[in-house]
Amino acid sequence: GIQVEQSPPDLILQEGANSTLRCNFSDSVNNLQWFHQNPWGQLINLFYIPSGTKQNGRLSATTVATERYSLLYISSSQTTDSGVYFCAVGFSGNTPLVFGKGTRLSVIA
Amino acid sequence: DGGITQSPKYLFRKEGQNVTLSCEQNLNHDAMYWYRQDPGQGLRLIYYSQIVNDFQKGDIAEGYSVSREKKESFPLTVTSAQKNPTAFYLCASSIARGETQYFGPGTRLLVL
């Protein structure tokens, strides 16, 4: 079946550090979204990025669809960046999103 | 403010009982979704709806039922046939299927 793998599963950072989160997927995609889930469970959409590069403040994302991976960059991390980051992909046509298991990020002051 | 609301925040179910989780959106979105999240896991799709009066099963629909009588509302019923219902339930919507999804705050369901 469809595989979405995220790495690393857990990450601990000192405040101010930079990090890169990776999402690998097993098939061609026409839909890729990154989400942040805060400690209270709320999911916020960060990027809709089936290909190319986007930036929003300290966050940026790059998807290389031909090589089947996406990267989420967090610069100058803050304690409020803590939580779980999910990658979700949609494949041919308008199939529903398939979520990875997430990367749990803890930013320590 | 536009957004997605879910209620209740916490729900307790007794053995053999059906319970209904509410999801309402005022974003004028056509597509709505229900996901289940278990501890330490990603989200799994239960049901989705692309338009009023239409819905499709997701990966784990057994033991659940939905309705979509209004564009704004997509309630989920957890039936007694769902033997392991304890989980965090998330509702989402998007302008259309395949577009950016926006999530509600979730409902935590616990079995007594």
Image (cartoon, rainbow, N blue to C red):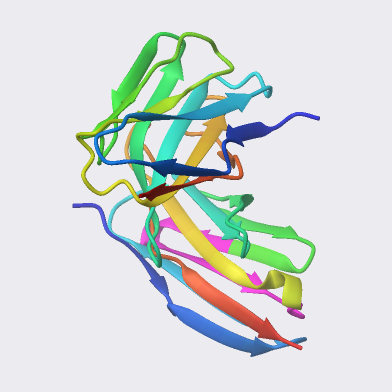
B73 is higher (above) or lower (below) than B108: above
A99 is higher (above) or lower (below) than B14: below
Depth check, front residue: A62 or A107: A107
Q: What residue is shown at x 30% (from left), y 23% (from top)?
A: B56
Is residue A69 within the magenta segment?
yes
A24 is higher (above) or lower (below) than A9: above
Q: What residue is shown at x 41% (from left), y 22% (from top)?
A: B49
Q: Is residue A31 visible in this depiction of the protein?
A: yes
Is residue A65 within the magenta segment?
yes
Depth check, front residue: A41 or A64: A41
Q: What residue is shown at x 54% (from left), y 19% (from top)?
A: B73
Indicate the position of residue A77 as horizontal and vertical percent values.
73, 79
Residue A7 occupies quadrant: bottom left
Which quadrant holds the C terminus of chain A? bottom right
Indicate the position of residue B42 as horizontal and vertical percent values.
40, 58
Indicate the position of residue B83 as horizontal and vertical percent values.
21, 44
Which range of residues does the magenta coloring cover? A62-78
Q: What residue is shown at x 24% (from left), y 33% (from top)?
A: B80
Depth check, front residue: A87 or B61: B61
Residue B39 occupies quadrant: bottom left
Please indicate whether residue A90 sits to the left or right of residue A63 in the image: left
Marks counted in the figure total 0
